[in-house]
Image: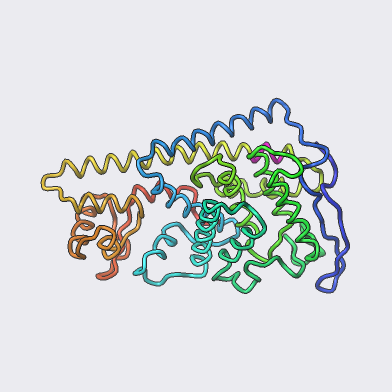
Amino acid sequence: MNRGLTGHFVPVSTLGEECRAFVPAPLPPVPKIILDDELHEQLQNASLAVGRLDGQIDVLPAPDTFVYSYVRKEAVLSSQIEDTQSTLDELLAHEVEQAPGLPTEDVREVSCYVASLELGMQRLAEGLPISLRLITELHGQLLSSGRGSTKQPGEFRRSQNWIGGTRPGNARHVPPPPDMVLDCMGAMEKFIHNDPVKTGTLIKAALAHVQFETIHPFLDGNGRLGRLLIALILSAEGMLRQPMLYLSLYFKQHRSDYYAHLQQVRETGDWEAWLSFFLCGVKETADDAALTARRLWTIFRQDREKLQLLPGATGSLLQAQEQLQRVPLLSASKAAAKMNVSLPTATKALQRLQTLGIVREITGGKYGRLYAYDAYLSILSEGTEPLR
């Protein structure tokens, strides 16, 4: 549907040139979104897929194990959309103290994303609603170190920014001027809290994401925080008990369509086309996450059964495999601490797993060796190859 502009332009002067900044109208859209039969079916299918994923929590032996790794996969993917070239194994290696040569700037940025996401879930569990206070707190964590740490972490921007192009005059999108950011964000906060009307969770997440990206309230980190906002809304509204649905891989795989839809909403008000794209991504992503969880637990079970059948299998061997389920990249010292055994015992267990082909030593050094649960990392890393 072509509703025309979903906001209005205001003249601004920045970097010595005049341009027009776009100020989005408050949500929900006017005229309201039309859910035709096709869109209604997509909404229903996406909701069912999320429900199936949420039900997966009840059958996983230890859902926190899957969530730990999936959160890190999301951090890598979301950062890659912003041209960060870190990989999942680099992030996991960074989280092991003995990893040599780390962290790089890219890995630091991804690590900050993990911390921001985990902080968001913690604040929601404490009863803090999605609010400007929460959003700025998460932004402060997101930019706490790395390249964005000098760009007003935790504060709405006080200068004009733009998206695409080399300057505001040739930019693809110029967000609202800084003195209008607080009002725009305040209106978005009300919408998230069902003011002026109650909005279904998936529709709310889809609309709020576009609005956040259009406002671009910070000098840096907007894309990552805008994608994180989707997961927070689904969790805050009880649609998912654990943060297991992230659209970054879908957005990465359909990067040009993603940006085109955002711009199309601003210029023509075609929220329906965006919703169709978004809901397709929700279903695809939820189905993939549920399948990934089943594949991982099949591997865990098969490897454990293999170990239990070994002559002279020790408790430390089974413990080591269990710890690698929780953290698929471990050093012997980390394993010893988590298993509450001596360093020689942990080392022997990891070396035995390496002999059996379950883990692979990836550093090649005599000291500070890292052992990777290969089959686990192979599944988890699917789609996380850096964009070039």
* Quadrant of the drawing holding the C terminus: bottom right
Residue 64 rendering spot, x and y as whole percentages: 41, 48
* 55 w.r.t. 357: above or below: above
Looking at the picture, does residue 198 appear above or below residue 66? above
- Residue 360 location, x and y as percent? 29, 56
At a point 72% along the width and 38% down the height, the residue shown is 273
Q: How many marks?
A: 0
Query: Is residue 75 at all visible to an observer of this figure?
Result: yes
- Frontmost residue, 51 versus 264: 51
Residue 388 visible here = no
Name the residue rendered at 59%, 66% in the picture: 140
User: Magenta region: which residues?
Assistant: 274-278
Quarter of the picture containing the N terminus is top right
Colouring scheme applied when the structure was drawn = rainbow
Q: Is residue 94 above or below residue 296?
A: below
Q: Residue at x 23, y 57 (%)?
A: 350
Q: Residue furthest left?
A: 312
> Residue 89, percent across and down?
41, 58
Q: Is residue 335 left or right of residue 27?
A: left
Pinpoint residue 247: horizontal percent, then vertical percent.
57, 46
Magenta region, main secondary structure: helix
Give the left or right position of residue 171, taking residue 309 as reference.
right
Q: Nearer the viewer, residue 243 or 373?
A: 243
**Which quadrant of the view contains residue 340?**
bottom left
The quadrant in which residue 216 appears is: bottom right
